[in-house]
Image (cartoon, rainbow, N blue to C red):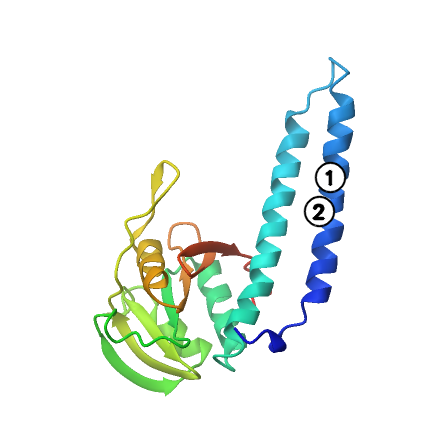
Amino acid sequence: MNRANCDFSPMKQTLKEEIRQVIAALQNNLESMDNEDYCLLGNFEKIKESFADIDMKAATFYLNCYLAPFTDKYPELSICVQNMSNLRHGGLIVIQREDSLESLIKPGISIGAELTHSLLESIFFPGNPLHDGAVMISYNQIVSAANVLPLSGRFTGDKKLGTRHRAALGLSERSDALVLVVSEETGRVSFCLNGNLYPIATQGVI
């Protein structure tokens, strides 16, 4: 990643302030434990939600940084995944970075068109013959669709990952590609990089 494209200071300042707020809330709960009539369960739930929000904000910021050196079209990607999330249309989008992916991917149908959110959304529209596979993006081009990715055997907790998430992780475990995933079941958006899965916010994704 070319860190010169990213100014980390505003994000760090925001996260520091929100982490301080969580620490203050934990301190208040610690002091409240001396009151036997005070139930902490609701407060713990709010603190857990705050941690999740901090995690998603950080992941959203870093996603922008990871994409910016490799495509100028990340605003188009943002619009695409937000619209797909709202409609709960599943999707799997591979952004090639420095590593060659030819030996890792079973190629699908050649597209060779400029990356636009409307074209991406149409590819993943339910019923489209290409919607089940992964779309390959290189720089500002949609290279191909209906590509098959290697699957990861990883489990998350007690729940096995869905096929799209396993495919995203499988490719990111074997290359430096960044893979965006939209869940058909929940509409949640995540990205995979270096074998890790990160949830991101659906409003102002990139």
Provide residue 190's location: percent of width, then percent of height. Answer: 46, 57
Taking the view exactly as shown, the residue that stands out farthest to the top is 36
Residue 169 in percent (x, y) is at 36, 57
> Is the C-beta separation of discs 1 and 2 under 8 Å?
yes
Residue 98, how many percent across, how many down? 40, 77
Is residue 162 left or right of 115 when viewed as pictured? left
Tell me the SS state at disc 2. helix
* Residue type, numbered disc 1: Ile
Query: Quadrant of the image for the C terminus?
Result: bottom right
> Which residue is identified by label 2?
19
Q: Taking 57 as reference, is 181 left or right?
A: left
Looking at numbered disc 2 in the image, what kind of residue is underneath it?
Answer: Ile
Cα–Cα gap, marks 1 and 2: 6 Å
Q: Residue furthest bottom?
A: 113
Percent across and percent down for residue 53 are 62, 49
Residue 141 numbered mark, or none = none
* Residue at image point 77% right, 22% down: 32
Residue 88 in sight from this viewpoint: yes
Q: Residues within 10 Å of mark 2 (few under 14, many from 20)?
A: some
**Residue at mark 1:** 23
